Image (cartoon, grey):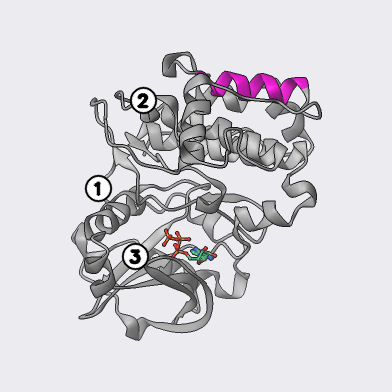
Amino acid sequence: MSAAPGIEDLPELLKDVSPVYREPVTDTAMKMMQHPAYGNPYEWSTADFELGAPLGRGKFGRVYVAREVHSQFMVAMKIMFKSELTKGRVERQVLREIEIQSRLKHPHILRLYTWFHDEKRIYLALEMASQGELYKHLRKSPFHRFDEHRSAKYTYQVADALNYCHMNNVIHRDLKPENILLTADDNVKLADFGWSAHTMSNKRKTMCGTLDYLPPEMVDGTSYNDSVDQWCLGILCYEFLVGNPPFESENTESTYKKISRLDIVYPKHLSVGAKDLISKLLRKSSAARITLVDVMKHPWVKENMKKSGRETVLHKKV
Ligand SMILES: Nc1ncnc2c1ncn2[C@@H]1O[C@H](COP(=O)(O)OP(=O)(O)OP(=O)(O)O)[C@@H](O)[C@H]1O
């Protein structure tokens, strides 16, 4: 990974900005990405932003629309109280999230532009994803599921983002519809790197993530590597198309058992292609799981992606 966030994908980030504001907004975005931690002098503070309407609330953060005062550049400002982070013993998790997310620059990963703090709070200036959580959209859809076109498009975009993470030695480890946000133009942004980890060459043994999305190697407590994210992508794709995750049960124990036995039911309405992809992701042996690059090239994904006309661009290592 490069030491400082680059500006090469600014055109993508700023494509919806009106030409009138493009120059000041570009200057501001560049200034934000030159955080003091990277050796640059500008120190952001609350004086640089006007807070607007609340966007949502998490366990430790409140998120507001915010506008940089000079350029009017819009961001989603996440504000966390230091005392709450300390009480919840999540300071290290938050620091890791900041460290990892600020270095990842990809069209389908929520950008952390800059961060700063005062005596009581930590502020994260995040890219705006105005349609909010993908989960909300899934719940609102008929039968709580997406059609094949939407499912394939989102699966492709998440695979693209995860592939970029893996190329940069980052495992997300907590993929689920709640951690994916949707932009105004219906593209996904992977968020919430609180459970993510730098991998380097090691195999990890920490158990984390959400129960329904836990891969067998985490359930069994054996070591795992970045292919846990492929497993979670399989669960995600299933949930998109079926409306609930495949191992969902009344209690924790039976969910564990189902995962361990790979006790999975494919409803009749699933197409042959979708079932083929999901079954290649949900393999017990992590080494046997289809690669993320092959997910993006899978015939079912390509066939259904065609309808949206998005071009296939594989993103390179930073
Ligand atoms: N960049 C963003 N753009 C638009 N809305 C956002 C953005 N980030 C967060 N939100 C909204 O704010 C809510 C709270 O986000 P936050 O990141 O604080 O919590 P969370 O990750 O959902 O929950 P938790 O604190 O449990 O991890 C989200 O559910 C979403 O609706």
C-alpha separation, residue under disc 1 versus residue under disc 2: 37 Å
Above or below: residue 132 compared with residue 208: below
Instruction: Determine which residue is flagged by label 2.
Output: 220
Instruction: Determine which residue is flagged by label 1.
Output: 3
Q: Does residue 69 appear in this view?
A: no
Three-letter code for the amino acid on which mark 3 is drawn: Thr
Of labels 1 and 2, the one closer to you: 2
State the residue at coordinates (31%, 49%).
Answer: 100
Q: Nearer the viewer, residue 275 or 18?
A: 275
Q: Residues within 10 Å of mark 2 (few under 14, many from 20)?
A: few
Left or right: residue 304 versus residue 129 is: right
Q: Does residue 231 appear in this view?
A: yes
Three-letter code for the amino acid on which mark 2 is drawn: Asp
Instruction: Pinpoint residue 103: horizontal percent, then vertical percent.
Output: 33, 49
State the residue at coordinates (23%, 74%).
Answer: 83
Whether the magenta-drawn stretch holds residue 273 is answered as yes
